Image (spheres, rainbow, N blue to C red):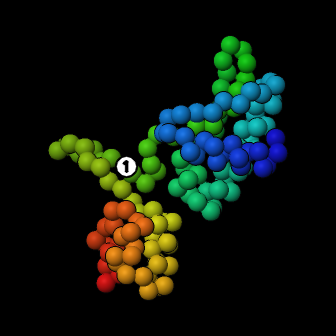
Amino acid sequence: MNREIVLKWLEVVDAYKPGESLFLATENRDHSKLMVKQFKEELKILAELDPVKANKLAVATAVKDGKYWVEVKRTLGSPLVGFKKSATGVERTSIADPERRRRLAFMAEDGMTLAEVEETEDDLTEEEKEMFR
């Protein structure tokens, strides 16, 4: 499969809701393995550029009724959100989005005010707000 086609399919699946999948028909098992390899190579490159986006996508071979398919899936949840289980219960925990941090740093360097940033960025943390004070 052409690299541009693989990238287009990844863009399509990135727009899916979490849990939704795209299935691409293949000729046989070997063809399926080759296509999965191509998708994974592109996801590896994407992970260098946008690790959050790359972690929201998964690729695997699927077999249904003796036919081989490539499944490209929009995974559930965000790779930036986790859950901590303790004796007192379960609590949500998260890590900062590296792309968002980079974008906010550029905004601060450009001299944008907190009000201007809040127009384009949702739910700033106190730490992020401090960058503009």
Q: Say how many tags the image has.
A: 1
Identify the residue under disc 1: 82
Residue at screen point 37% across, 62% down: 122
Front residue of 123/41: it is: 123
Q: Is residue 42 visible?
A: yes
Where 23 sits versus 55, above or below?
A: above
Front residue of 129/65: it is: 129
Q: Residue 9: x percent and y percent?
A: 69, 42
User: Quadrant of residue 35 in the image?
Assistant: top right
Q: Is residue 61 visible?
A: no
Residue at screen point 67% across, 21% down: 63
Where 60 sits versus 83, above or below?
A: above
Front residue of 10/67: it is: 10
Front residue of 74/48: it is: 74
Q: Residue 48: x percent and y percent?
A: 63, 61
User: Quadrant of residue 115 in the image?
Assistant: bottom left
Residue at screen point 73% across, 23% down: 68
Please indicate whether residue 105 sits to the left or right of residue 127 in the image: right
How many other residues sit within 10 Å of disc 1, few (<14), some (14-19) or many (≥20)? few
Please indicate whether residue 16 sits to the left or right of residue 121 in the image: right
Where 67 sits versus 10, above or below?
A: above
Q: Residue 8: x percent and y percent?
A: 71, 47
Task: Identify residue type, mark 1.
Answer: Gly
Secondary element at tag 1: strand
Find the residue positioned furthest to the left: 88
Q: Residue 92: x percent and y percent?
A: 29, 49
Quarter placement of the C terminus: bottom left
